Each structure stands twice: as structure tokens, then as C-alpha cells.
Image (cartoon, helix red, strand yellow):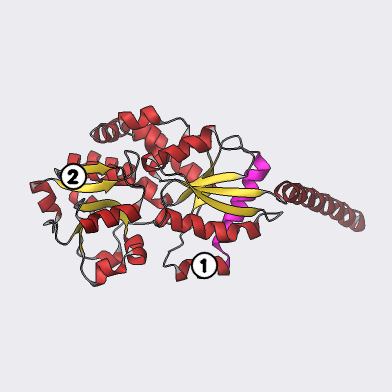
Amino acid sequence: MIVRRLLHCAAILAATLAVHAAHAESIADFYRGKTLTIYVGFGPGGGYDAYGQLLGMHIGRHIPGQPTVIVKHMPGAGSLALANYLYNVAPADGTAFGIVAAAVAFAPLIGAPQEKASVRYDAAKFGWLGSLEKFTAIGIAWHTSGFKTLEDAKARELRFGSTGPASGAEGYAILLNELLGTKNKAIRGYRGSNDITLAMERGEVDGFYGWCWTCMKADRPQYITEKKVNVLVQLALEPEPEMAGVPFVLDLIKDPKDNQVVRLVLAGLSMSRPFAAPPALPAERLQALRQAFVDTAADPAFLAAAKKAGRDISLLQGEQIDALLREGYALPGDIVQRATEVFSAK
């Protein structure tokens, strides 16, 4: 009897392994000899580009069949252009995905009217692969701009660079306008953080909202060491230990409902560098890409490259992004309505 049971278990195990082997082989057959394109929803030189390039250099080794991986830029409207492309145009076969702003995931829910009018996707139907960073957003002003504190931005207009209405920059700046009385004004048309920081240095804009603390440390460390910028505020669900003394947004918002609104707006910061694949991706290929994403995030060579580039890695898996969206889209209507009213001021 025992021998019979052991033989039965062995047969089940063999069958299971055979199925997995066939699955892996079919994925490998599909990707072998193909080119996988990773799109970046912003211009070259910024944080999104950095994470897109890092992933592009390493993920191919973790996908069965090891396809060639290339990275392309598709900037526009705070990455809304890329989101629409991925959802409606890009091949839905597993050969294309991209990195977009986290705000894109919540634009259909709490975006400004013009933003919602431009949305051509259902955020829940993307094949979310995961996110590589969780960051603290900051608001900064150039040291010669005359803005030293958030109180200065309440007294007069602060012009900040923006990639478009769907960007975190505008969302955070307008949030501060509506709930704290600042006078932030978006200057649109920039392709990414690299262009915005250069514009700030040239005096075209006064500051920058929605950049991340780790991004500034990696891309412009001299801003900190040479005191080139004043950090006006930090925006996150928890304060950044390295930024002691910088006003924390949730400490500034006293009204309980407004505090909930801010938490909804900032929910995307836990998925700060999200990668999305087109909808209707075959389930087995989506799973293969998700597994490759997780494996890459744990790859010593990838982690070493990220460290060398000054990029923090904080993995949020695709299934966790799915859950985060379900939670956000299920919030009470009055909270969502208030957040929508805030963003309508864009």
C-alpha cells in the first residue's frame, strides 16, 4: 500500500514537472530571437529613464528564451501618452511594456477634467509587472529664486516645471494650493526631470514639485552639498528620516477628511516606478514577465548596477499593485469627490 502511494505521488510530481517544463519551453519558444521593447514615458536623463535602462540591461537574462531588450522614449503629458499607447496600440503579446508615472494609475479616478478626457485606458486592466522604487516626493526651489520656505510660496506665485497635467508634479503642487493656500503655477512642456532641473538652473522656473529625494541625491548631489536648492516640503505617507526638519505634508493638513484625501493622492508613491504591459496579455506571458521582474530585482548584478547609479531598489510586485488599485478605487465617494475637486484646479 505504501509503495503504491509513493508511486502515485511520484507520478503526480512527474506530471506536474512535465507541465511546468512544457510551459517554460513554450515561453522560451515565443521569446527566443524576438526583441522586447521597454518604453519610458519621459525624456532621457531622469529617474524614470534610469530605472527603465537598468531594467532593460538585466531583465532579458531572466525571461525564458532571453530576448533582445531595447529601451525607447515616448514622453508626453506626464506619461499619459505612453499609457494610452500601451493600452490601445502596443502589441499585446508580451514584446512591449513601459514605465509610467504612478499618477497615471489613479488619473481615471481623481484626475483633473482635461486629464480624464485624455484617458483611453482602464488602469485595472493593465498587466502591471511591478515597481522598483518607493520614494518621498519633494518640493524644491532654486536658491536664488527667493523661495526659502513653503510660507514664501503662499505669499507669491512659484513657477514650477511640469511634464503635463498627469504628472505627479502638478498633482502635488495643486494639492498644496488647495489645502494649504500656496500659489504654485505649472509651466508645462518639459520632457522630464532633467529638463526641469536645467530650466530651474537657468531661471526659467522657480522650482520643482514631485521630484524624489533619492533622485536628487543620485542625479544632482551638488544641490544638497552646495545648498543650491531649498527643500520646501516632503510628501509621503511616512516622513523620510534623512529629511528631519523639512515640513511633512500630513503634519500640515489638519482636517481629517483632507488628510484622507492626501493619503489617496499619495498612495501611488509606494509604486513610484511602475511598469505596465498592455491589457489582454496572455496569462502565461504576463506571469513570465512578472517572475522575470521579481528575479531581476533580486539579481546581484542588477542590484550592483543600481547601487553604482545611486538608485534605491524597493520592489512592489505586480499583484500588489493590483491590490493597491482595488483599494484606492473602492474608497468612499466623498473622499474621491474631494480629491477630484482638488485636482480640478489644475
Query: Which one is in front in this view, the residue at disc 2 or the one at disc 1?
Result: 2
Does dot 2 land on a helix, a strand or a loop?
A: strand
Residue drawn 34% across the image and 34% down it: 110
Q: Nearer the viewer, residue 162 or 272?
A: 162
Could you tell me residue 127's position as x and y percent? 55, 41
Quadrant where the image shows the N terminus:
bottom right
First reached walking from the N terminus: tag 2 or tag 1:
2
Q: In which quadrant will I find the C terminus?
A: top left
Label 1's element?
Answer: helix
Q: Position of residue 14 (x, y in %)?
A: 84, 53
| Residue 296, quarter of picture | bottom right
The stretch in magenta equals 282-299
Q: Quadrant of residue 114?
A: top left
Name the kind of residue labelled 1 in the image.
Leu
How many numbered discs? 2
Q: Is residue 333 above or below residue 301?
A: above
Residue 32 in picture, x, y percent from top left: 72, 51
Task: Give the label on residue 184, or none.
Answer: 2
Tags 2 and 1 touching, CB below 8 Å: no
Gap between marks 2 and 1, in whole Å?
A: 37 Å
Which residue in the structure is indicated by mark 1?
A: 303
Q: Residue furthest front?
A: 202
- Decide if residue 229 is on the left or right side of residue 241: left
- Comparing 182 with 185, the one in front is 185
